[in-house]
Amino acid sequence: MSEEVKKKKKYVPNPNSAKYKLGKIVEKHYKEAIEAKANGEKIGWCASNFPEEICQTLGIKVVYPENQAAAIAARGAGEKLCNIAEADGYSNDICAYARISLAYAKIESAPEQDMPQPDFMLCCNNICNVMIKWYENIAKEKNIPLIMIDIPFNPDKEVSKEQIAYVKGQFLEAIKQLEEISGKKWNENKFKEIMKISNRTSKAWLEATSYCAYKPSPLNGFDLLNHMAVAVCARGTVEAAEAFEVLCKEYKENVKEHKSTFRVEEKYRIMFEGIAVWPHLRVTSSGLKDRGMNMVATVYADAFGLLYDDLDGLIRCYCGVPNSVCLESARDTRIDVAKRTHAEGLLVHTNRSCKLWSGFMPEMSRQVAKACDIPLTSFDGDQADPRNFSEAQYETRVEGLAEVIDSRKGDC
Amino acid sequence: MYTLGIDIGSTTSKCVILKDGAKEVAKSLIVAGTGTDGPNRALNEVLKKANLKLEDVSYIVSTGYGRKGYRLANTEISELSCHAKGVMHLFPKVRTIIDIGGQDAKVLSINERGRLAEFVMNDKCAAGTGRFLDVMANVLKLDISDLEKEARKATNPVQISSTCTVFAESEVISQLSNGSSRENVVAGICKSVANRVATLAKRLDIKDEVFMSGGVAKNEGVRNAMEEVLNTKIVYSKDSQLMGALGAALFAYEKSIKEE
Ligand code: SF4
């Protein structure tokens, strides 16, 4: 046998595949930010739910600490960075994304995922209030400006006119501040164009996620957790829209050809609630796959599909992101997703990092499970601090969930 | 046909051998769990008692925390289903099972067809489990099996409010140094376990009959406290700890018939 044949074939990704394109977008996103910084441009650190469209219109480069923290945790350095923040006095009860980010701001280097240091901070509290102090502290340490948009928690189902007016005033002020910081000018026509592209991306994302409803699903739901980064950091770019459109095509094709990126027989369809356990992604995903359990429903599917017609519509979307709405709205969105995708069970990640998300989860998941008449189980974990997860406990709960689903089907 | 169920827990290993999926031939229980020689000893003991060789056993199902790495098993099934199966075999009227093991606590709800319908488990913390009682018995210089005798003598159980085992330990010490009697402290400890697991149980719809399984079920102090907080009668068997292994042996029988 010749040498070449003996060698294991190297995996060559197909450059026309959505996976490749999406990966390249994230790569390019960091690369461009690093280059811009080297060229003396001002760089921002930006909250994932801050209206990306503003920065895109102004041509300002921003990077996302939450995405970075997830990448660092997934590549195994979560604990190291958490320890650095804790040694500085931050409690280990604080969100691990915050601890990793605060540590990174201090040490300014992490081979797992580097990004340029900030010249300003863009914060938005429609996600949580931890973020305010986290961003404030970095702004103070680095003596840089913090732009903060206050989007209050919404106890009602609708977004009121007053709320839109309140947030709009802050948007316009943020634009002014950013013009001053960057020296770049706001262009209304470009903004309209960006809104259009952003909608195109969202539509494609929503369509791609909607394929989960097929039985069996043409995709492994965990794929979405990876692709999501693009929906966060590049929503307003044509490349993102195109890559998601390719993804839709691939899924459509899979349906036609009875193929799936979930490479084993789909025996169970579940809803996974919460952020991924990034430090234990392999264990958590193979714990499902080994049992033929596919995640077909996640609230992320709808969360990043922001559709709107104008500025007011855009603001309405940002006022309605998952963490800023009341239990009833949050519950109804999930019931809708679970029913649409025919989920047979609910697996809840009780995320020790995220008090906001996990705090109302026991009641909400109970209501979702009841409304959909599906069994529910939860496990303790953490999105980025590897110390808060036990593999054996996870395995038993997942196995238990599968057994209850079987038992309900009556074939155990 | 002989089938064997082995339940490898965090602190104990249990085996049950059944003949034709019905008659219990032998059982064993060794106080040494996963990662020790406990599983092997439990296996050898049960085979010896049954007067059988390993080759005589047609099918083995492993369950419990250490079920995964057990090479002799034909298959593994989670302790949730095995406990439910074992208990339903002996106590068909049971609809709620509270199982407190060495490091976890779970509550199972059984439907009208006798199948597992729902379950809840403790969070990552081991408070309210067997390990918690072990630590407390140690502080009080008592054998774990003496806790119930002490609890029986209590006149005025103290309040142990910390959920954390380490904090509860210092709470116990300060109760004793403040003059509380050992029996009142023990009863307080049992009550705190019952309280913690009862809050878990209340997340499900508790239906009668309620059965307690697992090592902690042997402790009458906890059983009584549980009856009080849940306001219901608790059914119990002296073989409570063997329910998982029994369930596994029953599954082993079903599986081997199916595979034949
Ligand atoms: S994980 Fe939760 S606490 Fe952390 S930043 Fe996100 S919303 Fe806030």
Image: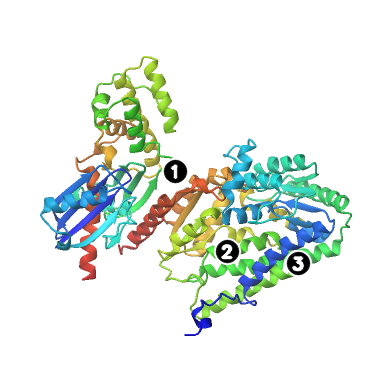
Element under disc 2:
helix
Question: Which circle's residue, 3 or 2, is located before the other in the chain?
Answer: 3
Marks 2/1: CA–CA distance: 27 Å
A163 lies left or right of A384: right
Comparing labels 2 and 1, the label whose residue is closer to the camera: 1
Estimate the x, y position of residue B233 in percent, counting from the top left.
26, 36
A217 lies left or right of A26: left
Estimate the x, y position of residue A127 in percent, counting from the top left.
65, 48
Query: How is the rendered protein coloured?
Result: rainbow
* Chain to which mark 3 belongs: A
State which quarter of the image contains the N terminus of chain B.
Answer: bottom left
The residue that disc 3 covers is: A196
* Chain to which mark 1 belongs: B
* Chain to which mark 2 belongs: A
The answer to which quarter of the image holds residue A334 is: bottom right
The amino acid type, in three-letter code, at marker 2 is: Leu
The amino acid type, in three-letter code, at marker 1 is: Lys
The amino acid type, in three-letter code, at marker 3 is: Lys
Q: Which mark is residue A224?
A: 2
Comparing labels 3 and 1, the label whose residue is closer to the camera: 1
Do pointers 3 and 2 mark residues of a single chain? Answer: yes
Is B188 located above or below residue B18 in the figure? above
Label 1, residues with CA under 10 Å away: few <14, some 14-19, many ≥20: some
Marks 3/2: CA–CA distance: 23 Å
Q: Which mark is residue A63?
A: none
